[in-house]
Amino acid sequence: MKIKIAPSILAADFTRLGEQIREAEANGADLIHIDVMDGRFVPNISFGHLIVEAARRVTQLPLDVHLMIVEPEHHIEVMANAGANAISVHVEACSHLHRILQQIKQHGLKAGAAVNPHTPAVMIQEVLPLLDEIIVMTVNPGAGGQDFLPEVMPKLRQIRRMAGSIDILVDGGIDADTIGIVVENGANVMVAGSSVFGANGGIGAGIRAMRGVLENKSAG
């Protein structure tokens, strides 16, 4: 499977958001990841559909919206109208996960389920036919810049065996030091925030550093 880089704008400089999204696209990003936080499901508040609309105006890349919120069913339509291409909801936040995934797909979007570090893989087994992507959290959600949790790797392997060709995103602590292990364990989409937008040398350097690790692994 193609390995994709998905810069997370949670780590961007919001005084230069459009510029930085364009820079990520120009340097080979495959999609833009947008973390929506409500201060209830996770401790912090981030942003809503207006940021999705703004991102849509400056890039042709797919916008991957990650709803870290309670009652996500109330926000699917507005995110779809804002320009999202994919929406993922948290297993832990949904009383009726199957229904919400159907709702996402009815809007013509890719549908995803996200699982926190403590959540067992079996929690997504019954909805696999509805999934276009799975987000495996490699930190506890709610803030950028956290340390990668290697103890999630056995679950990542299990989910890859279950998921077949479904895209598996890893979100949290992904950089040039951790990209190799998550690819080895089955992930194919790398959500990277601080390691891209906070990289020494700029956004392009952050993306190139991760691509370089992958190229070296392929050559080896």
Image (spheres, rainbow, N blue to C red):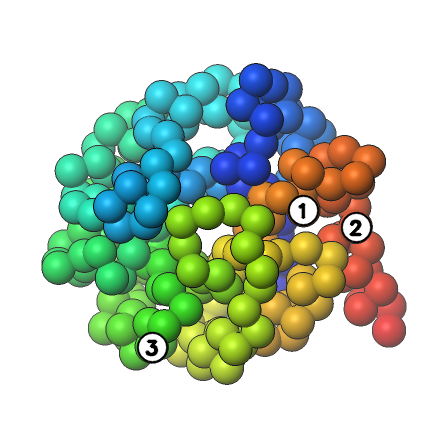
Name above or below for residue 13 compared with residue 176: above
SS at circle 3 = loop
Distance of mark 3 from mark 1, alpha carbons?
A: 27 Å
Neighbour class for label 3 at 10 Å: few (<14), some, many (≥20)?
Answer: some
Q: Quadrant of residue 51?
A: top left
Res 48 visible: yes
* Residue on which disc 3 sits: 120
Residue at 50% in and 82% down: 154
Mark 1 or mark 2, earlier in chain: 1
* Residue on which disc 1 sits: 195
Residue 75 x/y as whole percent: 22, 36
Relative to 64, is 207 on the left or the right?
right
* Residue on which disc 2 sits: 209
Residue 83 tag number: none
Q: Nearer the viewer, residue 60 or 69?
A: 69
Residue 142 x/y as whole percent: 40, 49
Residue at 73% in and 41% down: 199
Residue at 22% in and 56% down: 93
The three-letter code of the residue at mark 1 reads Ser
Distance of mark 1 from mark 2, alpha carbons?
A: 9 Å
Neighbour class for label 2 at 10 Å: few (<14), some, many (≥20)?
Answer: some
